[in-house]
Amino acid sequence: MATGMEPRLNQKFKGGRRRVDSVAEDGAARTARERMVQEQIVARGLTDERVLAAMRTVPRHEFVPSATIAEAYVDSPLSIGFGQTISQPYMVAYMSEQLTCFPTGAKVLELGTGSGYQAAVLVNMGFEVHTIERIPELADSARATLDRLGLSPSSLNVADGHAGWPSDAPYSAIIATACAKSIPKEWNEQIENRGVIITPIQRRLNRQMLVKMTKEGTKMESRNLCPVRFVPLIDERGDSRRSSVLGRLWRRRS
């Protein structure tokens, strides 16, 4: 999707380990994104064209704080405040590629909106995206950025991710960008048959594993994908206990 006119910046962008001198933001950012895609994503074996096109198109620098805009295209997560981060570009692409078995228009629930970057990539890929964020300030910021870029999801909710979002269920996929201690039963209930859940799970010794769970009738088949490090999935009280849904922040008008 088009992002409209992009502002001019006197900043330098990084693509992988390289710095890109910026004259006009659009040219510098596009160059940085292309290097990011080639050096961080394609070089690690990801090839799906929908994913690569979205990563080339969505302006990651729009989703990071102004203090770290020069680092927007580095191969690393970045702080976005409130103890949260925007994920490493490769991890966003990798998790998105797990959903490419679903067609354009498939319904996806994202748990942990954060900056809004992952949601923007999924929207750009053509999914019907519903996303949840427990921190109102981050939800407000993400909403403003997504609206401005023309990448608004179908709904953006302030809620406890443990409970999912039953109002728009069932979903073809649930993608969590925070680490759960276990899979809440609500997630399983909100996935359609042959739908998938992509989420980090807490393992022993404080280790995390990204898993892909596929619903087959009444059973969930689980496959380990790779070791990861995500912020914990917590509720509005600041712990990992399940709490009630706080309510919908915004829903796109049809």
Image (tube, grey):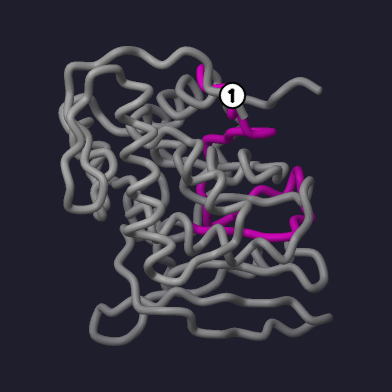
> Which image quadrant for residue 192?
bottom right
In this picture, residue 216 sits left or right of residue 222? right
What residue range appears in magenta? 148-176
Q: Report whether 125 appears left or right of 219.
A: left
Q: Position of residue 95 (x, y in %)?
A: 51, 62
Badge 1 marks a residue whose secondary structure is loop
Question: Would you call the spot at circle 1 few (<14 residues within 10 Å), some (14-19), or many (20 or more)?
Answer: few
Which residue does the image show at 59% across and 24% down from the upper left? 2
Residue hosting label 1: 2
User: Does residue 233 appear to the left or right of 9 in the view shown?
Assistant: right
Q: Nearer the viewer, residue 54 or 213?
A: 54
Asked which quadrant contains residue 230, the reply is bottom left
In this rendered view, identify the residue nearer to me: 245 or 87. 87
Give the residue drawn at x 35%, y 25%. 27
Q: Residue at x 47, y 42 (%)?
A: 56
Height in image: 12 above or below 97? above
Tell me if 233 is positioned left or right of 124 in this view.
left
Q: Residue at x 17, y 52 (%)?
A: 17
The answer to whether residue 173 is magenta is: yes
Instruction: Work out whether 65 lies above or below 91.
Output: above
Q: Position of residue 136 (x, y in %)?
A: 42, 30
Residue 30 forms part of the magenta stretch: no
> Can you give x and y, in whole percent of width and height, for residue 45 in the image?
45, 71
For the N terminus, the quadrant is: top right
Across and down, in percent, residue 94 comes to 48, 64
Q: Image height check: is 104 above or below 242?
A: above
| Total count of labels | 1
Amino acid type of the residue that numbered disc 1 sits on in the rendered structure: Ala
The quadrant of the picture occupied by the C terminus is top right
